[in-house]
Image (cartoon, coloured by chain):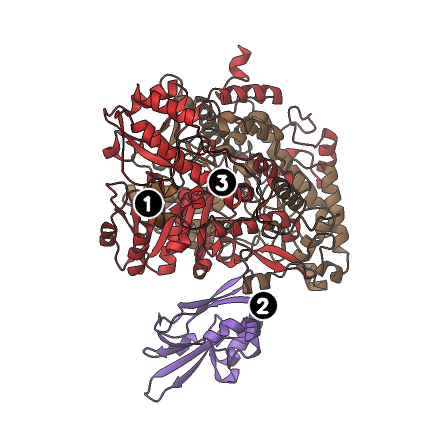
Chain colours: A purple, B red, C brown
Amino acid sequence: MKPEDLLFTKTHEWVHLTTNPTGETIATVGISAFALEALTDLVFIELPPVGRRVEAGGAFGEIESVKAVSDLYSPVNGEVVEVNTAVADRLDRIAEDPYGANWLVKIKVAGDVDRSTLLSYDEYQKQCAEESH
Amino acid sequence: MDPKAEGAGSLACCKRASSLTRFSPTFSSQTRMPYIPNTPADQEAMLAAIGVTSIEELFASVPRELRLQGDLNLPPALSELELTAHVAELSGSNVSAAQSVCFLGGGAYDHFIPAVVDFVAARSEFYTAYTPYQPEASQGTLQAIFEYQTLIAQLTGMDVSNASLYDGGSATAEAVLMARSVTDRPGRVVVLQSLHPEYRQIIAAYLANLDAELAVVPTPDGTVQPEALAAAVDDRTACVVVQHPNFFGCLEDVRACARVAHEAGAMFIVVVDPISLGLLVRPADYGADIVVAEGQSLGNPMYFGGPYLGILACREQFVRRMPGRLVGQTVDRRGNRCWVLTFQTREQHIRREKATSNICTNQGLLALRAAVYLAAMGPQGMRSVAELCVQKANYAIQRLTASGVLRRGFDRPVFKEFVVRAVDGEVEKRLESALGAGFLAGVPLGRWYPELADCFLVAVTEKRTKQQIDRLAEVLTTA
Amino acid sequence: MRNQQATQLLFELSRPGRRAVQLPPCDVPTRPIEEWIPAEALAASPPPLPELTEPDIVRHFVNLSTLNMSVDTHFYPLGSCTMKYNPKRNERLASQSGFADVHPYQPETTLQGLLAILHSVQEMLAEIAGLEAVSLQPAAGAQGEMTALLVAAAYFRDRGEHRRTVLIPDAAHGTNPASAAMAGWSTIQVRSTAQGLVDLEDLSRKLSSETAVFMMTNPNTLGLFDGQIAEIARRVHAYGGLVYLDGANMNAILGIARPGDFGADMMHFNPHKTFSGPHGGGGPGAGPIAVTAALAPYLPVPIVVRTDRGGYRLDYDRPKSIGRVRSFFGNTGVLVRTYCYLRTLGPDGARRVAENAVLNANYLLSRLKTFLDIPHGDRCMHEFVASASALKASQGITAMDIAKRLLDFGFHAPTVYFPLIVKEALMIEPTETESKATLDAMAEALERICREPADLLHQAPHSTAISRPDEVRAARTPILKFS
């Protein structure tokens, strides 16, 4: 996936929205390349079990480096339908493909996605540029 | 004024001086300040370098109206000679286990401490270092903790031990909090009545503001009936806490308890006496998920209850919910094996309000003592101590109950302590007369168990001799 | 000169059949163990511990000890830890059998000397705090915090008030929010001003009738005394809240100002810091708390009280008490050392501790500010926070590099990366027990380090047994025991 096609949260998660054959909206969620650059030396990730209900803005997991821990926030309301458990075994290489193979969870969206809380790629880049100062 | 009244022998605070000069006149001599190296000349040079003229100026940020008027109302300073005489007198006025014969237990025990334990722990480099934040300057402490963690894992059979907590009681409460988090069942905790009553009190205090229910399952016969336990455990229960040997010294049916807990999806927390593991099945082998223990028995003096050592070990899958420090092995930049604090993201300095616990360090010195003790005892030493405890305790039961004046509280297998019932109910009188004969004979149980007001708890360690036990039986039964 | 054979792990040194402790033969009539203990409760074999002789153990641990820096061997300016000298008289006196060999459940009549000491420690700590009542039970500062917050919860519950939140400045030690969460409170962070003090406006915005406690460290973690404290306390009290004073930094104000006099309702002490208890490689400490008269009924049991006949007893009969937070009385061994220390100091000596701790810190600050940034001003209390940000920006030299390199010069490193509100923080606390000569030597070493090439510093330390352990590896592939 190209980052330009994704939406972002202010808390550095990306989300890709698709519609499955049964008409349900599926949100694929991961961590942005910008955040991964800041979170060097990742050692652990905690992801939710399939079936866990999540809320937009609520934590669905955690990612740890040696001396820091960050919550992972869900961009949407819904239920976790798939978890990319393989990521846990390649944390040292997650930044190599943050928007492809290293997605974290897929969430079956409940209700409508509140797009006002999400940023376009350009908007997100602007936010990152500000944070870097 | 009688100098003695305000001097060495006095504990009373003196009246606060009315003077308003709260700061030392700059450059005054440092009388009676054996630990402050600054001379008046040093102070003068330092103030000049800072660019001020008095020490008081350095405190300018403390608003004048908030400062103490006059001196603290503390007793006057003593020289080392005076202090030594004064404190020795106070020490001498206590009856210690060295001057009497101690049969007291209930979570603190008079076990033998080999000299090598005191020797190692007195090394300044261990004694006056702090928690190992800089691994390059703390490999001694870090390796010793890693060895402690391994020794505790060997002793309990568990996968992982932390670097230690404060004491057995608070370690039990921490284990309960850990189980609530692991199971995601914060609402209910089940303990037995035969769990140390102070430990139960600690759990209750820790849970008081957390919206959790603490259920206590009765143990009227000295141990729990598995059916009674099963009735108390449900699918909201985070954990079952069982002490084995329990507070009364009796062995619980831990396998049955583990089954009850696991069938309900609850964690099984066992509180053990580490000395008993020289002989008893290791907790990992009967299904414990978390093992906690008071580590005082492992080479630490009784010291009126503290400082002690909280042991906590668990199965590997729970390690990220574990409270307390952990030391892990790694390599340095040259490839040398070495040790560091690890999994620190669990801890308060990183995770703040979401930390697994608020504990900051470990009981380093006491963990070191336990490590030296276990290394010195080895497998055979631990087995010998445990066997001596069992043989002597059972001999003591026989002797104490022989005349019929005293009876056993509970007819259950015991490890090193047991409940004695005074048939005439005269617990205080008997213990007092034993004290007169030089025996700290037992702990009365009425304070915690009103129904056992006619009972007391007797502990027999490897230090007690046949002669002492025989004499104890005499003084307790002839009173 | 290092003996690398003796510092192998105990488990590698072990040889079957060795033992260090021989126990006497059993002198009571014995029966087979199976007659006393059911077979299913007995282990098939003893625990698989290592087998060593006494000389194996001594050489191993003595060699291990030499891999540590310690207060007795090195200057240890670890900020917020108050690594002062540990007086040897305290050790000798506290290890007397009349204290060390006393069982916690002995009758009070056999404990009068010890209870007298503990009662006196309660009184002295109340006086130093400027507060009414003291509990000596908590085992460490962190446990003291939690205990006080449980006391606050019991107090509000008793008054029928439903409060939920604890307010904590962003400069606070992580223990404060962790303790608050353990005691069941939700936490709200209060901002600091650019000067490093509590932002009063932010505090006022966040105060409400839901506020139970405002937790504050004063002097704060930047080593600054927040002179707004009386106003802060007034605002918190106006909402019916309580002010908690984290006593971590009492070494700065001992005998100069009392928390109770400047508005605190409760506080904890760290006797292993302020009152010279040895740190033991991480513990034991103690965490006695002092509270106002209104909070006193909720303190843990027991408390030492005087009897009518001039003796002492343990008072368990306190119906509003929160119960207890650890077993038995408390960390008595640490408290006896506190007694010895305070009796050595007396009132005049107590104040001189703070005066010289503050003098030493300001002197070291005045030396360091010529070559390192001190973001929060020219004056401090007992400690200060320098920043390596400028060096990092210009040469990539971090606070950690400087800290590690200091070890090569024979100085323990300062606390680094704390408080969180200062970038590349180096938190330095010299204490009153160091001499001007030592401070000068450390300042010179630091100045030299700041001029050293970055590559040299990135690889530091160079003289220690190990250097730059791989912490990522330790966390990714955990090895938490020998196997």
Mark 3: few/some/many CA within 10 Å (<14, 14-19, 20+): many
Label 2: which secondary element: loop
Residue underneath mark 3: B298
Residue underneath mark 2: A40
Mark 3 chain: B
Q: Amino acid at mark 2?
A: Thr
| Res. C353 image quadrant | top right
Q: Point out the tag, 3 or 1, that comes first from the N-terminus.
A: 1
Q: Amino acid at mark 1?
A: Ala
On the rendered structure, is C422 left or right of C331? Answer: right
Question: Relative to the observer, which residue lies in front, B96 or A133?
Answer: B96
* B63 lies above or below B141: above
Question: Relative to the observer, which residue lies in front, C454 or C158?
Answer: C454
Identity of the residue furthest to the top in this view? B1
Q: Amino acid at mark 3?
A: Leu
Mark 1: few/some/many CA within 10 Å (<14, 14-19, 20+): many
